[in-house]
Amino acid sequence: MVWVPALIEVGLGTLALGPFLFHRLSVGQWRKNPPAYPLESTDSPALPITVLLPVWNEALVIEQKLDNLAKQEGASADLLIIDSASTDTTVGLARQWLEQHPKAFSHTQIIEMETRLGKSRAVQLALETLENQGFAGLVCMTDADAQLPENGLQRLSGWFADPTIGAVGASARRLGGLAQEGSHRTMFELLREGESAHDSTPFLEGSFMMWRSSAFNAHQLYPTANADDAQIATQVRLNGLRSIHDSEVKFQDIAPSTPEGQARQKVRRAQGLQRLLLRHRKQWWNRRLGKFAMILRREAHFHLAAPLLMLGVGATAILRWGTVMFIGMPNGELALLHGGLALMELFGLTAWALHRNGMRLPGLTPVGSILTGFEHLLAAMWTSFRGRSLHMWDQHTDTRKLASKQKK
């Protein structure tokens, strides 16, 4: 009887993890031909830029953020702050800073929402405002706790000399946090680079991204779901232009400093990506999208199918051990099969336990990152199944406190 759950466990594990390995190998090949940065052209004028800054209770970092934006080289920009009904002094501090630095931006505007409705709705409202004003140019969205490199706006805006580019995102350089965050971030940025080279990536970093205003309409944003950045990146590609990741531009922010904080952040993100992929499930096999449809299918597997398959792996492992406890240890080849699976399970459980508690051990970190990711994806599924949306989330106050102490 042991061989039945053992074979099921092996089969489910292969179905869950095999596509990860295949995609990683594919990404390695795709990354050899990255998208070429366009050469500067004097034939067409530079597109105007509006920096969209969504805020909510950012009093600790808002002045530092505005200082950072004002130091941008070679790109004159407008500033649009959308405040989600802050209960602290965010808006007052922003107004005071703007009065003291009247030449920092070409034009400034602050929208104050009466009620907090989540970041996606705030971004949608800001974009509706720009559309009503007839804005035609580039929108740069950035978070209040993200510090941009001084050439950031100039570098990202340069991509749009290529008429096929609709959206560009930057890379994160996360300070603080747990030891494993760096390896987790590196792995996923490699995927974004490969997908960008092959066609487009559906996921960009909302802490610093830019898109053509003509490539995305405000009504295409789903306001009661999070992952607004991924919503924009994916829709830009569905609208006919490319969404790419620029690994040369690195913004700086602070990662949550506790396992609980990082888990909360990742579960929230996971729910947003899962809901996004499900909403666009008809596009997984859309031939018109070409290579991007394949990328969407693979991402759907990683975020939706693989976690459930791994849950099946765990259930059949428990069933196998229960069978062994009931009928006794098998002999011969079954004993080798059971022993081999037991060693693999011990390896996986050790990697998972170390990673989720912020500890690193050579050889275990990549496995721990994947397994912890499955945990977060399953938690996000369970949250959605219970009918709870995470688009209204509590702020990570530890990251703001740490960010406020960084050198300006």
Image: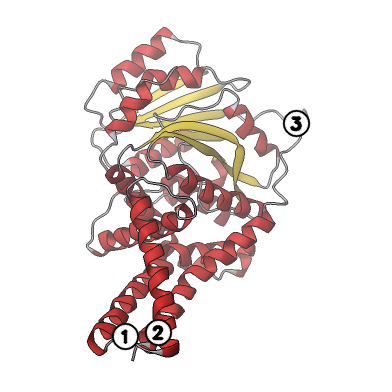
Name the residue beneath numbered marker 2. 335
Identify the image quadrant of residue 57. top left
199 with respect to 308 (left or right)? right
Q: Amino acid at mark 1?
A: Met
Give percent across and percent down for residue 259. 30, 45
Q: CA distance from mark 2 to mark 3?
A: 66 Å
Q: Are marks 1 and 2 in contact (CB under 8 Å)?
A: yes
Q: Quadrant of the C terminus?
A: top left
Query: Which of marks 2 and 1 precedes in the sequence?
Result: 1
- Quarter occupied by the N terminus: bottom left
Q: Secondary structure at mark 1?
A: loop
Q: Quick one: SS at disc 3? A: loop
Distance, label 1 to label 2, CA atoms, is 7 Å
Report the amino acid beneath label 3: Glu
Rendered residue at 23%/56% (across/down): 388
- From the viewer's perspective, tell me whether residue 197 is left or right of residue 267: right
Camera-nearest residue between 51 and 145: 145
Q: How far across and down, in percent of the image, does residue 352 sit? A: 37, 57
Name the residue furthest front: 332
The label shown at residue 329 is 1
- N-terminal label among 2 and 3: 3
Quick one: label 3 or label 1, which is nearer the N terminus?
Answer: 3
Instruction: For mark 2, give the secondary structure.
Output: helix
Say which residue appears at 39% left-offset and 10% top-offset. Answer: 99
Residue under the point 27% across and 87% down: 328
Q: Is residue 293 above or below residue 403?
A: below
Query: Looking at the picture, how far across and down is residue 387, in whole percent?
Result: 23, 60
Q: Which residue is mark 3?
A: 40
Placement of 31 over or under 206, stated as above or below: below
Q: Position of residue 317 (x, y in %)?
A: 33, 76
